Image: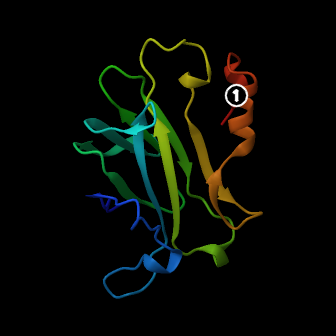
């Protein structure tokens, strides 16, 4: 997998999300990928100086350091399971789970998904939803696009102390 990591300044007036047709290879052919983009923050303010670890099917495939308060981008291939771990000194690790499997071949094209994740101080109460992955992103057949799994999200928030409710 070729991971593309770009960081650039985002101007609030010029911020635009890539559309599915915007993602193409050097031959101008659409790639079958999921492009993730987003920011990490503390108390609502964008932060820098954190690590990102990308695991594919349980194996570490990429690591990078984000040294500015800029949006980051990376591409994920289809038909894989990813865990993306965000690590900042003094804060709890945040994990984003992504399943890029798509059952219907007719929907294989490029997609985008944007996230904003909050770092939480180590002092935050343990054994709460803060200890679970922040989201589980999958292809949602009903909307024909990638989105976070609302059942997983609500289970973690409703019963945060029972880890078995967040079965993956």
Q: Residue furthest front?
A: 13
Left or right? Give the position of 49 relative to 16.
Answer: left
Task: Name the colour scheme.
Answer: rainbow
Residue situated in front as seen by the camera: 10 or 150: 10
Left or right? Give the position of 110 relative to 13.
Answer: right
Residue drawn 61% across and 18% down?
A: 128
How many numbered marks does the figure carry? 1
- Using the image, determine if residue 126 lies above or below residue 131: above
Classed neighbour count for the residue bearing mark 1: other residues with Cα under 10 Å, few (<14), some (14–19), many (≥20): some
Left or right? Give the position of 125 relative to 41.
Answer: right
Q: Quadrant of residue 60?
A: top left
Quadrant assignment for the N terminus = bottom left
Residue drawn 75% across and 26% down?
A: 158
Residue 81 in view of the camera: no
Residue 123 in view of the camera: yes
Residue drawn 34% across and 60% down?
A: 11
What residue did someone put label 1 on?
A: 157
Residue 40 location, x and y as percent?
A: 40, 41
Quadrant assignment for the C terminus = top right
Q: Quadrant of residue 44?
A: top left
Q: Secondary structure at mark 1?
A: helix
Left or right? Give the position of 70 relative to 130.
Answer: left
Residue 139 location, x and y as percent?
A: 65, 59
- Using the image, determine if residue 44 lies above or below residue 104: above
Residue drawn 43% across and 75% down?
A: 23
Residue 140 location, x and y as percent?
A: 70, 59
């Amino acid at each position: 997998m070729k991971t593309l990591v770009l960081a650039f300044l985002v101007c609030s007036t010029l911020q635009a999300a890539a559309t599915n047709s915007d993602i193409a290879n050097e031959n101008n052919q659409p790639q079958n990928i999921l492009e993730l983009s987003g920011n990490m923050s503390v108390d609502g303010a964008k932060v820098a100086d954190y690590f990102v670890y990308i695991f594919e099917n349980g194996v570490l495939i990429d690591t990078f350091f984000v040294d500015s308060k800029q949006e980051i981008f990376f591409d994920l291939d289809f038909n894989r399971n990813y865990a993306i771990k965000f690590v900042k000194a003094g804060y709890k690790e945040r994990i984003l789970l992504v399943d890029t499997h798509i059952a219907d071949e007719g929907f294989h094209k490029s997609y985008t998904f944007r996230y904003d994740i909050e770092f939480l101080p180590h002092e935050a109460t343990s054994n709460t939803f803060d200890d679970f992955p922040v989201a589980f992103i999958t292809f949602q057949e009903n909307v024909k696009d990638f989105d976070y799994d609302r059942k997983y999200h609500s289970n973690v928030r409703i019963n945060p102390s029972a880890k078995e409710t967040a079965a993956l």
